[in-house]
């Protein structure tokens, strides 16, 4: 292999020349393969200047440099002395990646209680769930610059029929750039609850075009389906790739696959299960007159708003009660989260408090893959890296784990050390290397899996001083994060949704 001596930038004549192999996984930034003899005093700036001189781009491109899985923060000489025992003769393999700008806070959306879930999967809108027991849609155009600013943008509020709180939420209709998008179809939104049910809401198709033009943006929005299966709080819900099904998971250790209404298969306006007695659920809205019905009676005589044909209220209000098409059993304990595989339409993944990650076939209902980690390493959430079969899970013991779904062995391929328990992770939508995490310490961190020893960026969300949320608490813990590659949002105990500009690779 050729050995090249770098002529620029200028360096001291007393510098030791180190053999460096520079490489990248980005084909558009590749330079000729060679071992470069570089001054030991060089840092990121000088290395980046060298790459730009070889590439000769139209505009300078800033680069970061990774050595042995760690970002180069000082000089090459300092790294060799601290990490290589002062070995100045062995070739140093240095990977270079395009630099990312640190996240920049854009503002906040104050809420009245803890924010349990957030989603930015539909461009221009924030979807959130709250322990105030509702889901809410807010346009991503009016974040407040200060906590004292009381100006609130127009929003759609979707109340759950209980006061127990909403635990998670998700868009269940394709966004405008999706191949299955139908501009005339109602927009579906789901919210899981502490009440053990998943509530599906329908929003008029034109409602999001201009929320400000509606005197009451929530008018005409209604719950059309209530999904029954679980005996514990719902921990996650996720739509299938074609948005024809929804996957739910729960603390009861079960996964449920439910059918969603589509143009080809519209909603069947009938109940499939009888009403559940809610007397032991202290937050259920109870009425003075109740009558228990069996499934046959409920199907024949109840209406979706909870009233029976004779005018008496039903045991629970909500949409048409639906049962699952498939129930998946196998976890020993609570399930922290579940997702549909981004590459294989018939596969779903789940992560449990038993320390395992499991892959399921939704057609047969069989558990095809079991990746068992340490049983004390409870998994709280799961996502999948873009363009790969790599799964990422957040855990109670302050780590994020990566798993290679292509391998049958129960091997954690990589761990990232976070600052506290990590209840939410989100992979970059297009990059196979970057992801964001939210932790109970209030930190948002952006990671590059090529540099697993430390986060690229870490920002602490500061709770507002006039915190008067219903849930109380320290206001520190974050519960959910989402990232569309340009904008990152997060919410938690402080009752706010924070917004940051954050571009990923």
Image (tube, rainbow, N blue to C red):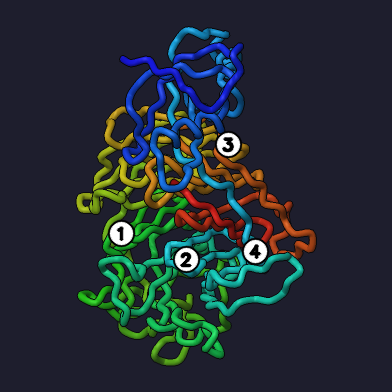
Q: Which mark is residue 191?
A: 2
* Residue nearest the observer in this picture, 210 or 357: 210
Precedes in sequence: disc 3 or disc 1: 1
User: How far is the residue under mark 4 from the one under mark 2?
Assistant: 22 Å
Query: The N terminus is located in which quarter?
Result: top left
In terms of secondary structure, where does tag 3 sit? Answer: loop
Residue 134, image x and y in percent? 55, 70
Above or below: residue 488 compared with residue 315: above
Return the residue nearer the eye: 223 or 30. Answer: 30
User: Residue 374: x, y in percent?
Assistant: 46, 29
Q: Earlier in the sequence, mark 4 or mark 2?
A: 4
Label 3 vs label 2: CA separation? 28 Å
- Residue 108: assigned label: 4
Q: Secondary structure at mark 4?
A: strand
Q: Residue beneath label 3, please?
A: 418
| Closer to viewer: mark 4 or mark 2 | 4
Q: Are marks 1 and 4 in contact (CB under 8 Å)?
A: no
Mark 2 or 1: in front is 1
Q: Residue at x 34, y 42 (%)?
A: 330
In x, y percent, where is residue 411?
A: 37, 27
Q: Are marks 2 and 1 in contact (CB under 8 Å)?
A: no
Above or below for 2 versus 194 = above
Q: Answer yes or no: do the residues labelled 3 and 2 have beta carbons within 8 Å?
A: no
- Label located before the other in sequence (1 or 4): 4
Residue 441: which quarter of the image?
Answer: top right
Location of mark 1 (residue) = 240
> Residue sitting at 58 percent across and 56 percent down?
500
- Rounded to the nearest angstrom, the CA distance separating label 1 from label 4 is 31 Å
């Amino acid at each position: 292999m050729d050995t090249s001596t770098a002529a620029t930038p200028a360096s001291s004549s007393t510098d030791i020349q180190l053999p460096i192999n520079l490489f990248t996984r980005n084909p558009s930034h590749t330079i000729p393969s060679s071992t470069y003899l570089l001054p030991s005093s060089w840092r990121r700036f000088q290395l980046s200047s060298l790459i730009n001189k070889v590439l000769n781009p139209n505009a300078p491109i800033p680069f970061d440099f990774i050595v042995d899985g760690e970002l180069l923060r000082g000089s090459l000489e300092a790294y060799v002395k601290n990490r290589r025992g002062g070995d100045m003769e062995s070739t140093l393999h240095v990977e270079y990646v395009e630099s990312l700008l640190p996240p920049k806070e854009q503002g906040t959306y104050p809420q009245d209680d803890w924010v349990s879930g957030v989603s930015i999967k539909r461009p221009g809108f924030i979807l959130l769930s709250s322990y105030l027991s509702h889901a809410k849609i807010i346009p991503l155009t009016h974040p407040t610059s200060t906590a004292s600013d009381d100006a609130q943008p127009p929003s759609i509020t979707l109340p759950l029929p209980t006061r127990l709180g909403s635990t998670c939420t998700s868009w269940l209709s394709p966004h405008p750039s999706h191949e299955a998008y139908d501009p005339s179809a109602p927009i579906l939104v789901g919210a899981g609850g502490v009440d053990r049910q998943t509530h599906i809401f329908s929003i008029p198709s034109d409602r999001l075009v201009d929320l400000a033009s509606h005197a009451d943006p929530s008018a005409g929005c209604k719950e059309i389906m209530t999904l029954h299966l679980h005996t514990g709080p719902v921990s996650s819900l996720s739509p299938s790739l074609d948005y024809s099904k929804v996957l739910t998971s729960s603390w009861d250790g079960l996964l449920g696959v439910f059918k969603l209404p589509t143009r080809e298969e519209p909603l069947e306006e009938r109940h499939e299960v009888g009403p559940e007695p809610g007397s032991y659920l202290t937050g259920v809205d109870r009425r003075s007159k109740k009558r228990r019905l069996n499934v046959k009676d409920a199907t024949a005589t109840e209406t979706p708003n909870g009233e029976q044909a004779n005018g008496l209220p039903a045991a629970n209000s909500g949409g048409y009660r639906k049962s699952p098409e498939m129930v998946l059993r196998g976890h020993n304990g609570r399930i922290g989260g579940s997702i549909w595989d981004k590459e294989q339409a018939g596969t779903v993944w789940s992560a449990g408090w038993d320390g395992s990650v499991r892959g399921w076939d939704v057609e047969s209902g069989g558990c095809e893959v079991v990746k068992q980690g340490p049983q004390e390493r409870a998994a709280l959430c799961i996502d999948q890296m873009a363009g790969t079969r790599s799964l990422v899970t957040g855990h109670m013991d302050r780590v994020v784990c990566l798993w290679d779904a292509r391998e049958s062995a129960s091997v954690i391929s990589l761990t990232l050390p976070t600052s506290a328990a990590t209840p939410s992770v989100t992979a970059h939508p297009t990059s196979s290397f970057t992801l964001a995490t939210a932790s109970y310490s209030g930190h948002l961190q952006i990671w590059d899996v090529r540099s697993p020893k430390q986060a690229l960026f870490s920002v602490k969300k500061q709770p507002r001083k006039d915190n008067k949320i219903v849930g109380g608490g320290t206001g520190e813990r974050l519960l959910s994060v989402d990232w569309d590659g340009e904008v990152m949002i997060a919410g938690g105990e402080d009752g706010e949704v924070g917004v940051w500009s954050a571009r990923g690779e």
